[in-house]
Protein backbone atom coordinates (compact mmCIF):
# COMPACT_ATOMS: atom_id res chain seq x y z
CA UNK A 1 0.00 0.00 0.00
CA UNK A 2 1.41 3.38 -0.94
CA UNK A 3 1.72 6.24 1.52
CA UNK A 4 -1.47 8.20 2.23
CA UNK A 5 0.48 11.44 1.87
CA UNK A 6 1.77 10.45 -1.57
CA UNK A 7 -1.66 9.32 -2.64
CA UNK A 8 -3.11 12.68 -1.65
CA UNK A 9 -0.31 14.55 -3.41
CA UNK A 10 -0.78 12.45 -6.56
CA UNK A 11 -4.48 13.20 -6.68
CA UNK A 12 -3.76 16.88 -6.20
CA UNK A 13 -0.96 16.92 -8.74
CA UNK A 14 -0.60 18.93 -11.91
CA UNK A 15 -2.91 18.50 -14.89
CA UNK A 16 -0.01 19.32 -17.23
CA UNK A 17 1.51 15.88 -17.37
CA UNK A 18 -1.82 14.11 -17.86
CA UNK A 19 -2.59 16.46 -20.74
CA UNK A 20 0.81 15.70 -22.24
CA UNK A 21 0.01 11.97 -22.07
CA UNK A 22 -3.49 12.58 -23.51
CA UNK A 23 -1.78 14.38 -26.38
CA UNK A 24 0.33 11.34 -27.18
CA UNK A 25 -2.77 9.14 -27.21
CA UNK A 26 -4.66 11.59 -29.43
CA UNK A 27 -1.68 11.74 -31.79
CA UNK A 28 -1.78 7.94 -32.18
CA UNK A 29 -5.48 8.04 -32.94
CA UNK A 30 -5.78 11.14 -35.16
CA UNK A 31 -2.20 11.66 -36.38
CA UNK A 32 0.28 14.06 -34.77
CA UNK A 33 -0.51 16.79 -37.32
CA UNK A 34 -4.10 16.93 -36.04
CA UNK A 35 -3.20 17.47 -32.38
CA UNK A 36 -2.39 20.99 -31.15
CA UNK A 37 -0.32 20.47 -28.05
CA UNK A 38 0.14 23.65 -26.01
CA UNK A 39 0.51 21.71 -22.76
CA UNK A 40 4.16 21.37 -21.76
CA UNK A 41 7.09 23.79 -21.62
CA UNK A 42 9.20 21.42 -23.71
CA UNK A 43 11.05 23.76 -26.11
CA UNK A 44 11.29 22.78 -29.78
CA UNK A 45 14.13 25.16 -30.64
CA UNK A 46 17.40 23.29 -31.31
CA UNK A 47 20.10 23.22 -28.63
CA UNK A 48 22.85 25.82 -29.21
CA UNK A 49 25.61 24.62 -31.53
CA UNK A 50 28.22 25.27 -28.86
CA UNK A 51 26.47 22.74 -26.60
CA UNK A 52 26.68 19.93 -29.15
CA UNK A 53 30.26 20.95 -29.97
CA UNK A 54 31.17 20.96 -26.25
CA UNK A 55 29.72 17.47 -25.78
CA UNK A 56 31.69 16.17 -28.78
CA UNK A 57 34.91 17.79 -27.68
CA UNK A 58 34.55 16.58 -24.10
CA UNK A 59 33.84 13.01 -25.16
CA UNK A 60 36.78 13.04 -27.55
CA UNK A 61 39.30 14.53 -25.17
CA UNK A 62 38.52 13.73 -21.54
CA UNK A 63 38.82 10.49 -19.63
CA UNK A 64 35.84 8.41 -18.72
CA UNK A 65 36.32 9.12 -15.01
CA UNK A 66 36.66 12.88 -15.41
CA UNK A 67 33.49 13.00 -17.53
CA UNK A 68 31.24 10.40 -15.98
CA UNK A 69 32.51 9.93 -12.43
CA UNK A 70 31.03 11.27 -9.20
CA UNK A 71 31.78 14.93 -8.65
CA UNK A 72 31.87 17.00 -5.48
CA UNK A 73 28.24 17.08 -4.20
CA UNK A 74 28.15 20.81 -5.03
CA UNK A 75 29.57 20.21 -8.51
CA UNK A 76 32.96 20.61 -10.16
CA UNK A 77 34.78 23.58 -8.64
CA UNK A 78 35.95 24.83 -12.06
CA UNK A 79 32.36 24.72 -13.38
CA UNK A 80 31.05 26.63 -10.34
CA UNK A 81 33.84 29.15 -10.82
CA UNK A 82 32.80 29.74 -14.44
CA UNK A 83 29.13 30.10 -13.43
CA UNK A 84 30.03 32.62 -10.70
CA UNK A 85 32.22 34.69 -13.05
CA UNK A 86 29.55 34.63 -15.74
CA UNK A 87 26.89 35.90 -13.32
CA UNK A 88 29.24 38.63 -12.09
CA UNK A 89 29.94 39.75 -15.65
CA UNK A 90 26.26 39.85 -16.60
CA UNK A 91 24.68 41.25 -13.44
CA UNK A 92 27.42 43.07 -11.52
CA UNK A 93 27.21 40.57 -8.64
CA UNK A 94 30.17 39.25 -6.64
CA UNK A 95 29.65 35.50 -6.45
CA UNK A 96 32.53 33.08 -5.99
CA UNK A 97 32.49 29.36 -6.77
CA UNK A 98 31.77 28.73 -3.08
CA UNK A 99 28.30 30.23 -3.44
CA UNK A 100 27.25 28.03 -6.37
CA UNK A 101 25.80 24.51 -6.19
CA UNK A 102 25.21 22.66 -9.46
CA UNK A 103 21.80 20.97 -9.42
CA UNK A 104 19.51 18.60 -11.27
CA UNK A 105 17.62 21.38 -13.06
CA UNK A 106 15.47 23.98 -11.35
CA UNK A 107 13.32 21.27 -9.82
CA UNK A 108 16.40 19.82 -8.11
CA UNK A 109 17.53 23.31 -7.11
CA UNK A 110 14.19 24.14 -5.47
CA UNK A 111 13.96 20.82 -3.64
CA UNK A 112 17.50 21.26 -2.34
CA UNK A 113 16.74 24.80 -1.17
CA UNK A 114 13.57 23.64 0.63
CA UNK A 115 15.39 20.76 2.28
CA UNK A 116 18.11 23.09 3.54
CA UNK A 117 15.66 25.72 4.83
CA UNK A 118 12.50 24.11 6.11
CA UNK A 119 11.46 22.55 9.38
CA UNK A 120 8.07 20.82 9.49
CA UNK A 121 5.27 23.39 9.55
CA UNK A 122 7.38 26.24 8.15
CA UNK A 123 5.43 28.35 5.70
CA UNK A 124 6.48 29.14 2.14
CA UNK A 125 4.66 31.92 0.33
CA UNK A 126 3.90 31.55 -3.37
CA UNK A 127 2.24 34.04 -5.72
CA UNK A 128 -0.75 32.76 -7.67
CA UNK A 129 -0.89 31.87 -10.46
CA UNK A 130 2.18 29.72 -9.81
CA UNK A 131 3.98 26.63 -11.15
CA UNK A 132 1.97 23.85 -9.57
CA UNK A 133 4.98 21.64 -8.80
CA UNK A 134 5.91 24.06 -5.99
CA UNK A 135 3.26 22.38 -3.86
CA UNK A 136 5.09 19.07 -4.07
CA UNK A 137 8.52 20.61 -3.55
CA UNK A 138 7.42 22.41 -0.38
CA UNK A 139 5.58 19.36 0.98
CA UNK A 140 8.63 17.16 0.31
CA UNK A 141 10.40 19.06 3.08
CA UNK A 142 7.44 19.26 5.44
CA UNK A 143 6.61 22.86 4.59
CA UNK A 144 3.21 24.46 4.16
CA UNK A 145 2.30 26.42 1.02
CA UNK A 146 0.68 29.81 1.61
CA UNK A 147 -0.84 31.37 -1.50
CA UNK A 148 -1.06 35.09 -2.22
CA UNK A 149 -3.47 36.22 -4.94
CA UNK A 150 -2.42 38.64 -7.65
CA UNK A 151 -3.90 42.00 -8.49
CA UNK A 152 -6.42 40.85 -11.12
CA UNK A 153 -5.52 43.57 -13.61
CA UNK A 154 -1.70 43.36 -13.51
CA UNK A 155 -1.07 39.79 -12.30
CA UNK A 156 1.51 41.28 -9.92
CA UNK A 157 1.33 40.25 -6.24
CA UNK A 158 -1.36 41.86 -4.10
CA UNK A 159 0.94 43.56 -1.59
CA UNK A 160 -1.75 43.97 1.09
CA UNK A 161 -2.49 40.28 0.99
CA UNK A 162 1.23 39.51 1.08
CA UNK A 163 1.64 41.66 4.19
CA UNK A 164 -1.29 39.91 5.86
CA UNK A 165 -0.02 36.42 5.04
CA UNK A 166 3.53 36.78 6.42
CA UNK A 167 3.56 35.21 9.88
CA UNK A 168 6.10 34.11 12.46
CA UNK A 169 6.18 30.78 10.60
CA UNK A 170 7.11 32.27 7.22
CA UNK A 171 10.49 30.90 6.27
CA UNK A 172 10.64 31.63 2.57
CA UNK A 173 8.87 33.13 -0.39
CA UNK A 174 9.20 31.91 -3.96
CA UNK A 175 9.48 34.47 -6.73
CA UNK A 176 9.40 33.11 -10.26
CA UNK A 177 10.51 35.75 -12.73
CA UNK A 178 9.45 35.83 -15.59
CA UNK A 179 6.37 33.99 -14.39
CA UNK A 180 5.15 30.61 -15.53
CA UNK A 181 2.16 30.62 -16.27
CA UNK A 182 1.25 34.33 -16.68
CA UNK A 183 4.26 35.53 -18.70
CA UNK A 184 4.38 38.59 -16.44
CA UNK A 185 7.70 40.12 -15.34
CA UNK A 186 8.15 41.49 -11.83
CA UNK A 187 9.96 44.75 -12.47
CA UNK A 188 12.21 46.73 -10.16
CA UNK A 189 9.36 48.47 -8.31
CA UNK A 190 7.66 45.20 -7.44
CA UNK A 191 10.91 43.60 -6.34
CA UNK A 192 11.82 46.61 -4.19
CA UNK A 193 8.40 46.61 -2.50
CA UNK A 194 8.64 42.90 -1.70
CA UNK A 195 12.21 43.31 -0.41
CA UNK A 196 11.24 46.28 1.82
CA UNK A 197 8.28 44.38 3.27
CA UNK A 198 10.41 41.30 3.99
CA UNK A 199 13.09 43.40 5.73
CA UNK A 200 10.37 44.91 7.92
CA UNK A 201 8.89 41.50 8.73
CA UNK A 202 12.32 39.99 9.44
CA UNK A 203 12.82 42.67 12.09
CA UNK A 204 9.34 42.12 13.51
CA UNK A 205 9.78 38.34 13.83
CA UNK A 206 13.51 38.32 14.56
CA UNK A 207 14.51 35.71 11.97
CA UNK A 208 15.43 35.50 8.30
CA UNK A 209 12.79 35.18 5.62
CA UNK A 210 14.43 33.92 2.44
CA UNK A 211 13.54 34.71 -1.13
CA UNK A 212 13.94 31.70 -3.39
CA UNK A 213 14.15 33.16 -6.87
CA UNK A 214 13.17 30.57 -9.46
CA UNK A 215 14.56 31.75 -12.78
CA UNK A 216 14.44 29.16 -15.56
CA UNK A 217 13.09 31.81 -17.96
CA UNK A 218 15.55 34.58 -17.07
CA UNK A 219 16.72 35.15 -20.65
CA UNK A 220 13.28 34.78 -22.24
CA UNK A 221 12.12 38.39 -22.17
CA UNK A 222 10.58 40.54 -24.88
CA UNK A 223 10.42 44.18 -25.89
CA UNK A 224 13.62 45.08 -24.01
CA UNK A 225 12.12 44.36 -20.57
CA UNK A 226 14.53 43.78 -17.67
CA UNK A 227 14.38 41.08 -14.98
CA UNK A 228 15.97 42.38 -11.74
CA UNK A 229 18.67 40.11 -10.27
CA UNK A 230 17.33 39.43 -6.79
CA UNK A 231 20.56 39.18 -4.77
CA UNK A 232 21.16 42.85 -5.64
CA UNK A 233 17.89 43.81 -3.92
CA UNK A 234 17.56 41.50 -0.95
CA UNK A 235 20.36 39.92 1.12
CA UNK A 236 18.64 36.66 2.05
CA UNK A 237 18.22 35.42 -1.50
CA UNK A 238 18.85 32.02 -3.06
CA UNK A 239 18.59 31.98 -6.86
CA UNK A 240 17.65 28.78 -8.67
CA UNK A 241 18.51 28.61 -12.36
CA UNK A 242 18.04 25.98 -15.03
CA UNK A 243 19.41 25.47 -18.52
CA UNK A 244 16.26 23.51 -19.43
CA UNK A 245 14.53 26.34 -21.25
CA UNK A 246 17.30 28.71 -22.34
CA UNK A 247 19.28 25.88 -23.97
CA UNK A 248 16.35 23.56 -24.81
CA UNK A 249 17.73 20.72 -22.68
CA UNK A 250 14.97 19.96 -20.13
CA UNK A 251 15.56 16.22 -20.29
CA UNK A 252 19.23 16.61 -19.40
CA UNK A 253 18.45 17.94 -15.90
CA UNK A 254 21.03 20.62 -15.26
CA UNK A 255 20.90 23.91 -13.36
CA UNK A 256 22.38 25.59 -10.31
CA UNK A 257 21.77 27.51 -7.09
CA UNK A 258 23.50 30.86 -6.58
CA UNK A 259 23.42 32.03 -2.97
CA UNK A 260 23.78 35.62 -1.83
CA UNK A 261 27.04 36.04 0.09
CA UNK A 262 25.21 38.43 2.42
CA UNK A 263 23.41 35.52 4.07
CA UNK A 264 24.52 35.13 7.69
CA UNK A 265 26.16 31.75 8.38
CA UNK A 266 26.90 31.46 4.68
CA UNK A 267 29.27 28.52 5.03
CA UNK A 268 26.68 26.59 7.04
CA UNK A 269 24.05 27.40 4.40
CA UNK A 270 26.33 26.16 1.59
CA UNK A 271 27.11 23.02 3.56
CA UNK A 272 23.36 22.43 4.08
CA UNK A 273 22.58 22.88 0.37
CA UNK A 274 25.43 20.57 -0.59
CA UNK A 275 24.28 18.01 1.97
CA UNK A 276 20.70 18.26 0.69
CA UNK A 277 21.87 17.64 -2.88
CA UNK A 278 23.38 14.39 -1.61
CA UNK A 279 20.76 13.31 0.87
CA UNK A 280 17.85 13.86 -1.50
CA UNK A 281 19.56 11.32 -3.72
CA UNK A 282 20.71 13.63 -6.50
CA UNK A 283 24.29 13.13 -5.19
CA UNK A 284 25.61 15.55 -7.81
CA UNK A 285 24.33 17.24 -10.96
CA UNK A 286 25.12 15.15 -14.08
CA UNK A 287 28.89 15.38 -14.50
CA UNK A 288 29.10 15.53 -18.31
CA UNK A 289 26.34 18.13 -18.41
CA UNK A 290 28.06 20.33 -15.84
CA UNK A 291 31.12 20.52 -18.08
CA UNK A 292 29.11 21.05 -21.25
CA UNK A 293 26.98 23.96 -19.96
CA UNK A 294 30.05 25.61 -18.44
CA UNK A 295 31.34 26.05 -21.99
CA UNK A 296 28.11 27.66 -23.21
CA UNK A 297 27.23 30.19 -20.53
CA UNK A 298 27.14 32.98 -23.10
CA UNK A 299 25.28 31.00 -25.75
CA UNK A 300 22.64 33.14 -27.44
CA UNK A 301 19.04 32.27 -26.57
CA UNK A 302 16.62 32.15 -29.48
CA UNK A 303 14.25 34.78 -28.05
CA UNK A 304 13.22 35.87 -31.55
CA UNK A 305 11.68 32.46 -32.24
CA UNK A 306 9.47 32.68 -29.14
CA UNK A 307 8.69 36.34 -29.75
CA UNK A 308 7.30 35.51 -33.22
CA UNK A 309 5.19 32.71 -31.74
CA UNK A 310 4.00 35.02 -28.98
CA UNK A 311 2.78 37.65 -31.44
CA UNK A 312 1.22 35.15 -33.83
CA UNK A 313 -0.69 33.37 -31.05
CA UNK A 314 -1.81 36.56 -29.34
CA UNK A 315 -2.94 38.24 -32.58
CA UNK A 316 -4.65 35.11 -33.89
CA UNK A 317 -6.59 34.37 -30.70
CA UNK A 318 -7.60 37.94 -29.92
CA UNK A 319 -8.93 38.28 -33.51
CA UNK A 320 -11.13 35.24 -32.85
CA UNK A 321 -12.53 36.92 -29.74
CA UNK A 322 -10.45 35.27 -27.01
CA UNK A 323 -9.23 37.46 -24.17
CA UNK A 324 -5.47 36.95 -23.76
CA UNK A 325 -2.82 38.28 -21.37
CA UNK A 326 0.04 39.58 -23.53
CA UNK A 327 3.19 37.90 -22.17
CA UNK A 328 6.27 39.94 -21.29
CA UNK A 329 8.51 36.92 -20.78
CA UNK A 330 8.80 33.10 -20.64
CA UNK A 331 6.85 31.19 -23.31
CA UNK A 332 3.37 30.87 -21.86
CA UNK A 333 0.20 32.83 -22.46
CA UNK A 334 -2.96 32.95 -20.38
CA UNK A 335 -6.30 32.92 -22.17
CA UNK A 336 -9.50 33.71 -20.30
CA UNK A 337 -11.87 30.78 -20.18
CA UNK A 338 -15.17 31.74 -21.85
CA UNK A 339 -16.97 29.80 -19.10
CA UNK A 340 -16.39 29.93 -15.35
CA UNK A 341 -15.17 26.32 -15.24
CA UNK A 342 -11.76 26.43 -16.95
CA UNK A 343 -11.33 22.69 -16.47
CA UNK A 344 -14.54 22.01 -18.41
CA UNK A 345 -13.33 24.43 -21.11
CA UNK A 346 -9.96 22.66 -21.34
CA UNK A 347 -11.70 19.25 -21.53
CA UNK A 348 -14.05 20.47 -24.24
CA UNK A 349 -11.15 21.88 -26.31
CA UNK A 350 -9.25 18.60 -25.96
CA UNK A 351 -12.15 16.26 -26.70
CA UNK A 352 -13.69 18.17 -29.59
CA UNK A 353 -10.79 20.04 -31.17
CA UNK A 354 -7.63 18.22 -29.98
CA UNK A 355 -6.43 21.51 -28.52
CA UNK A 356 -4.38 20.84 -25.39
CA UNK A 357 -4.72 23.83 -23.05
CA UNK A 358 -3.85 23.61 -19.37
CA UNK A 359 -6.60 24.60 -16.95
CA UNK A 360 -5.30 27.34 -14.64
CA UNK A 361 -7.05 25.75 -11.68
CA UNK A 362 -3.86 23.70 -11.56
CA UNK A 363 -1.91 26.95 -11.03
CA UNK A 364 -4.35 28.03 -8.29
CA UNK A 365 -5.90 30.67 -10.51
CA UNK A 366 -9.19 29.42 -11.96
CA UNK A 367 -10.84 31.18 -14.88
CA UNK A 368 -7.96 30.90 -17.38
CA UNK A 369 -6.12 28.31 -19.44
CA UNK A 370 -2.40 28.34 -20.17
CA UNK A 371 -0.87 27.83 -23.60
CA UNK A 372 2.83 26.97 -23.94
CA UNK A 373 4.06 28.49 -27.20
CA UNK A 374 7.53 26.91 -27.28
CA UNK A 375 6.13 24.94 -30.23
CA UNK A 376 6.58 24.87 -34.01
CA UNK A 377 5.03 27.98 -35.58
CA UNK A 378 3.18 25.91 -38.19
CA UNK A 379 1.34 24.09 -35.38
CA UNK A 380 0.12 27.45 -34.07
CA UNK A 381 -0.95 28.40 -37.59
CA UNK A 382 -2.82 25.12 -38.14
CA UNK A 383 -4.46 25.32 -34.71
CA UNK A 384 -6.34 28.52 -35.58
CA UNK A 385 -9.03 26.69 -37.57
CA UNK A 386 -9.85 24.64 -34.45
CA UNK A 387 -9.71 27.73 -32.22
CA UNK A 388 -12.14 29.36 -34.64
CA UNK A 389 -14.65 26.54 -34.15
CA UNK A 390 -14.08 26.78 -30.40
CA UNK A 391 -14.77 30.52 -30.51
CA UNK A 392 -17.95 29.87 -32.50
CA UNK A 393 -19.08 27.24 -30.00
CA UNK A 394 -18.69 29.70 -27.14
CA UNK A 395 -20.15 32.57 -29.23
CA UNK A 396 -17.16 34.83 -28.64
CA UNK A 397 -18.11 37.13 -31.50
C1 LIG B 1 8.62 28.02 -12.99
C2 LIG B 1 9.35 26.74 -13.15
N1 LIG B 1 10.19 26.37 -12.19
C3 LIG B 1 10.87 25.21 -12.26
C4 LIG B 1 10.73 24.38 -13.36
C5 LIG B 1 11.50 23.10 -13.41
O1 LIG B 1 12.49 23.22 -14.38
P1 LIG B 1 13.60 22.11 -14.61
O2 LIG B 1 13.28 21.41 -15.88
O3 LIG B 1 14.87 22.85 -14.76
O4 LIG B 1 13.61 21.23 -13.44
C6 LIG B 1 9.86 24.73 -14.39
C7 LIG B 1 9.64 23.85 -15.53
O5 LIG B 1 8.78 24.00 -16.35
C8 LIG B 1 9.15 25.95 -14.28
O6 LIG B 1 8.31 26.36 -15.22
Image (spheres, rainbow, N blue to C red):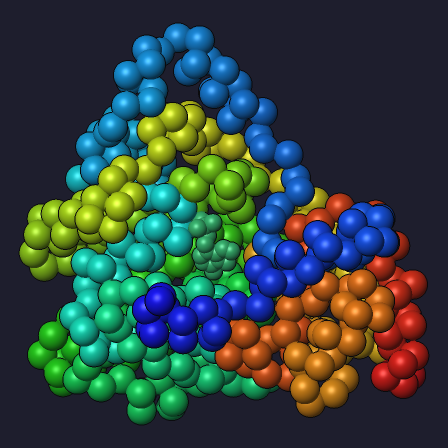
Residue 202 lies, with reference to residue 73, above or below; the image says below
348 relative to 385 in the view: left or right: left
Answer above or below: position of 187 versus 200.
above
Which quadrant of the view contains residue 342?
A: bottom right
Quarter of image, res 146? bottom left
Could you tell me which residue is drawn at 29 percent across and 17 percent down?
A: 66
Residue at point 66% right, 42% down? 44
Residue at 45 percent across and 79 percent down: it is: 157
Residue 52, percent across and down?
54, 23
Q: Residue 62: x and y, percent?
A: 35, 11
Q: Closest to the observer: 55 or 90? A: 55
Q: Position of residue 365 (x, y in %)?
A: 55, 81
Q: Position of residue 238 (x, y in %)?
A: 27, 57
The residue depicted at 71 percent of the width and 81 percent of the height is: 344
Quick one: quadrant of the N terminus? bottom left
* Residue 347 can be seen, yes or no: yes
Q: Nearer the viewer, residue 301 or 63?
A: 63
Amino acid sequence: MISRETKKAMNDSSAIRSLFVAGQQLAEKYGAENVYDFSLGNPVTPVPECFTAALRRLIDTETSLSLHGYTNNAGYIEVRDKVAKNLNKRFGTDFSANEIVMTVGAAGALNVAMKALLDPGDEVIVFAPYFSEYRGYVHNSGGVVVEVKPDASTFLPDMDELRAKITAKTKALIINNPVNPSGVIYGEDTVKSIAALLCEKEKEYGHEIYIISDEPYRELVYDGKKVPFLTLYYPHTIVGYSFSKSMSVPGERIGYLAVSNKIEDLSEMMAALTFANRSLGFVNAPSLLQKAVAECLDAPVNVEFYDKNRRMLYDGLTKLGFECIYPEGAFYMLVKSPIADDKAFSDYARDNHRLLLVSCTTFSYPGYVRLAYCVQPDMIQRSFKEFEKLAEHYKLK
